[in-house]
Amino acid sequence: MKSLIWRLAAATACAAAIVSAQNAAPPAVKDTPGKLTLRNGDTFQGVIEAFDANAGALTLRHPLALKPIVFSAAALRQYSAPAASATSDASDDWIVETAARERFQGRLIRMDAERLILKSDPLGEFSLARRVVVALERSETERVIYDGPKPGDEWVRRNEKFKVAADTVEAPQGQWVGLEAPSLPRRMRLDLTLRAHVPFFNISFYGESLRRVNDGAGAHYQLYYQMGQQLLLMRTVPNFGTQQVGSVELRRLGVPAGNRIALTLYVDLDRRRFVPFLNNRQVTEWTDNQPLEKAGGTIAFVAQNGMATITKLRIAEWNGRLPNEGRASAPLDGEVIQMINGDNLTGEILAIEPPNCKIRSPFGELTVPLQNLKRMDFRASGAGAPIGGGTRIATKNGDALEVKLVKIEKDVLLCESVGAGVLRIPMAAVREILWPEKSDDAPMPDAEE
């Protein structure tokens, strides 16, 4: 009942603010609005003006509202900023993984026995306690083919091109909608978020064109997601029809079913390897016994029941390695250093002062150029460190943090990280905020006008 009252009050307050704006010119919103999603499924376009954890409130500036709208923190699920239009050069960056499941990316300044210091565009220069550092890996920049959808992007529906109006694209029931690029990488990483009231949809990739995908006349692959029960990979070849490459029963794996699916698919066409992840979890791996002789640049979507909404579609080259694949675990009596030529060395990392790294090995102390190193696995004494507050923050630079979100004010997000301590992140650098799940029985105070 309390949840119902909250929903009615929130809808009434927001509608009143928006309707009242029809009789006056709405205030200009200089920032590009993101999308705020509430726990009840409601969404609002706008810019976060403030957040205060102590007050338990978030203030959103809506482009059609005369006054900012205030939401209870208990009602918040997710805030998504517009997709980044370009990817910065990260060829000299390193990626730090921590025991608190955080990921930081930036330029390596130095490291000693106590602290590791990085510098990045969104975070500036900051330090991490070495005891929570699990691994340090050279960033391998992968060319991004597409990152969207964004307003103005050109997509195809019913074999006709159209311009995207928002940061989402809708795939109607039985109608293919997609992107036609000159080509897709033969080693590809595909990321997307898809919402559907009835999650039953197909994703086609490597098709020659949307018309040929629609007609079933061209070669392509299709990934079938069937209502959280099953995931199938099919191959269509002209004159041979459609054949199943593989399938997996999702319910047996305990993969939660829902109307929001975060999908990552890794593809290596030359090795005919396909690895799907659902909600950041690998669910299977398939190998096709037949090659796809002609791979095109079309990726398309169709809903089998109701409407499907596509967001956060990212198509990039893939380096061929899965997350956590092929990485050596640091033994209790040493740390593991991987060279770019494939050699491994067990020892102790004494210090890093670019351009060199000092290592104590069974052969004595060595000074190794950083450019010769690929990855370092540490003995993280903070392996049991608690997660920092539960709110997940993703930046456009590639950082992934799990923090205690303190406040947002003056376009700066203030949070506390287990490894990095207090951080101040410009809101312009934030890609996503995901608040922790709470019980559906928790009371939700009214939204305020």
Image (tube, rainbow, N blue to C red):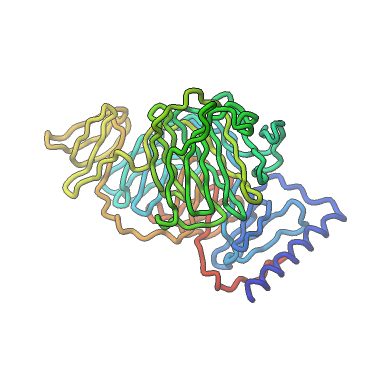
Residue 172 image-quadrant placement = top right
Report if residue 225 is visible in the image.
yes
Q: Residue at x 50, y 45 (%)?
A: 263
Q: Classify 349 as above or below 368.
A: below
Position of 407 with respect to 162 (left or right) is left
Q: Position of residue 92 (x, y in %)?
A: 40, 31
Q: Residue at x 60, y 50 (%)?
A: 411
Q: Residue at x 76, y 56 (%)?
A: 65
Q: Position of residue 137 (x, y in %)?
A: 34, 38
The residue nearer to you, when weighing 311 against 431, is 311
Q: Classify 40 as above or below 425.
A: below
- Quarter of the image for the N terminus: give it: bottom right
Q: Position of residue 163 (x, y in %)?
A: 71, 35
Residue 330 image-quadrant placement = top left
Q: Classify 441 as above or below 162.
A: below
Position of 344 with respect to 120 (left or right) is left
Report if residue 140 is visible in the image.
no
Q: Residue furthest bottom?
A: 1
Position of 321 with respect to 59 (left or right) is left
Q: Residue at x 54, y 57 (%)?
A: 258
Q: Residue furthest right?
A: 23
- Quarter of the image for the C terminus: give it: bottom right
Count the marks: how many? Answer: 0
The residue nearer to you, when weighing 24 against 258, is 258
Q: Classify 410 as above or below 177.
A: below
Q: Position of residue 118 (x, y in %)?
A: 39, 41
